[in-house]
Image (tube, grey):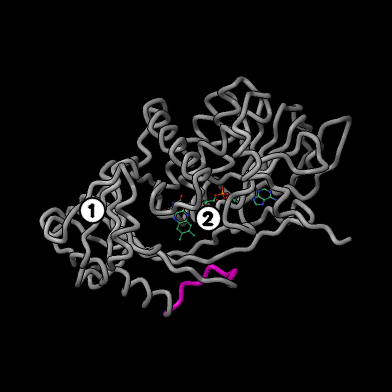
């Protein structure tokens, strides 16, 4: 049996690792448990955009996302490691008058005419109604960001167990006993951050998966200064001269196969932004499963009926963006800090937990 701890976090993706970090920073003893290796779940498949404006769902989501962007910039300063935090911003294309009007409502966006888009972005197909630049919407390398949170948590004393699947949770003396592959951990608090697999640990939880495929192109010499975004599709420039093209949205698929249909869809996305782009050499292709909740907002909060048990999962298209803010919300719940009640209500996991009568 391992040492009893204040908190066990189940899941070594971006949500679990950032949660472990912010809890350890408060001086809590933390044990993070991952069934595979750190950052090898959906986190690894993400593009890495911190797209508070491209993924707007409602005002509560928006203020939460903005806070998370600020936390990333602080973490980047404090972590002292490179996790691909890249400024520049996201340029959202307006391909119709309706889209232009919708984007023009943002006060913090810089309007670019079609001509300015052409001048600023080499080789681009300028959008008919111009574009809007959102400078705060930077991007990170998702796997590296997750590993950076994990390393920072460890340096603050957190224990991390990999290749350790949680298969049983029992209540014990007002806390929890967590059975993992080869041992048992006792903890006062438990955080379930197991992404798309969270429903296996919480009975009655509604969580589905939406498959997404991406491809990475060798674009050395191209110098794309911004991420380009239109209607859920994007081209992200990664340091080192590659571009990530994403992503498909495949409902009802729970496999990670790369498909011909996915490849065709990604080539079409690439061509839509920059004609000829799909002819660049493909370096990598991958797929991931976005954890989707009943209303696309994440489940963050107390799990009803279970004292000291929390959920931080179901971040759908926005888990990279929302990770630090999610972690801080869980931290505040555990240590009893004052909290924004609107958020507590909007993200309450009880929205997605149904039990048969
Ligand atoms: P995961 O990364 O899946 O981590 C959960 C971990 O829990 C896994 O490692 C798993 O092995 C572990 N686990 C599960 N069950 C157990 C158990 N019983 N015991 C121990 N461990 C367990 N988001 C953005 O913000 N920006 C983007 O640009 C973006 N692009 C995306 C592009 C694609 C193609 C996809 C698929 C997603 C994208 N996302 C993006 C969404 C983002 O990737 C997810 O929301 C995020 O990675 C979810 O993180 P997580 O930590 O909850 O899940």
Q: Nearer the viewer, residue 203 or 91?
A: 91
State which region is magenta: 253-260
CA neighbours of label 2 inside 10 A, class few (<14), some (14 to 19), many (20+): many
Magenta segment, prevailing SS (helix, strand or loop): loop
Q: Is mark 2 within 8 Å of ligand 1?
A: yes
Q: Is mark 1 within 8 Å of ligand 1?
A: no
Mark 1 lies on residue = 241
Q: Which residue shows up at 46% across the image and 35% down it?
A: 67
Q: Secondary structure at mark 1?
A: loop
Q: In the shown orientation, is residue 217 left or right of residue 251?
A: left
In which quarter of the view is residue 266 placed? bottom left
The reply to whether residue 245 is visible in this rendering is: no
Mark 2 lies on residue = 42
Using the image, determine if residue 214 lies above or below residue 340.
below
Q: Position of residue 98 (x, y in %)?
A: 32, 65
Q: Nearer the viewer, residue 127 or 187?
A: 127
Q: Nearer the viewer, residue 257 or 340?
A: 340
Q: In the shown orientation, is residue 16 left or right of residue 81?
A: right
Q: Which residue shows up at 53% across the image and 68% down it?
A: 256
Question: Along the polypeptide, which appears first: circle 2 or circle 1?
Answer: 2
CA neighbours of label 1 inside 10 A, class few (<14), some (14 to 19), many (20+): some
């Amino acid at each position: 049996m391992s040492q009893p701890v204040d908190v066990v976090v189940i899941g070594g993706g971006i949500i679990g690792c950032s949660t472990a970090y912010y809890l350890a920073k408060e001086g809590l003893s933390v044990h993070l448990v991952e069934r595979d290796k750190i950052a090898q779940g959906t986190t690894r498949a993400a593009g890495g955009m911190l797209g508070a404006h491209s993924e707007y769902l409602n005002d509560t989501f928006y203020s939460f996302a903005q806070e998370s962007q600020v936390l990333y910039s602080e973490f980047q300063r404090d972590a002292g490691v490179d996790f691909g935090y890249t400024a520049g911003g996201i340029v959202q294309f307006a391909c119709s008058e309706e889209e232009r009007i919708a984007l023009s409502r943002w006060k913090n966006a810089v309007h670019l005419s079609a001509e300015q888009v052409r001048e600023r972005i080499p080789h681009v197909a300028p959008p008919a109604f111009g574009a809007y630049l959102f400078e705060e919407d930077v991007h990170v390398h998702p796997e590296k960001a997750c590993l950076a949170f994990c390393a920072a948590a460890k340096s603050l004393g957190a224990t991390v167990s990999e290749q350790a699947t949680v298969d049983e949770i029992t209540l014990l003396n007002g806390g929890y006993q967590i059975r993992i592959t080869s041992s048992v951990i006792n903890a006062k608090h438990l955080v379930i951050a197991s992404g798309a697999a969270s429903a296996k640990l919480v009975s009655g939880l509604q969580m589905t998966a939406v498959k997404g495929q991406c491809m990475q192109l060798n674009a050395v010499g191209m110098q794309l200064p911004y991420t380009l975004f239109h209607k859920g599709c994007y081209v992200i420039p990664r340091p080192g001269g590659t571009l990530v093209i994403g992503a498909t949205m495949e409902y009802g698929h729970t496999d990670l196969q790369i498909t011909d249909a996915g490849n065709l869809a990604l080539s079409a996305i690439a061509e839509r932004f920059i004609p000829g782009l799909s002819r660049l050499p493909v370096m990598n292709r991958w797929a991931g499963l976005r954890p989707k909740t009943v209303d696309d907002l994440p489940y963050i909060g107390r799990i009803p009926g279970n004292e000291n048990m929390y959920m931080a999962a179901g971040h759908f298209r926005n888990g990279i963006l929302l990770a630090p803010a999610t972690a801080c919300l869980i931290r505040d719940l555990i240590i009893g800090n004052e909290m924004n009640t609107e958020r507590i209500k909007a993200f309450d996991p009880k929205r997605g937990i149904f039990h048969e009568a």
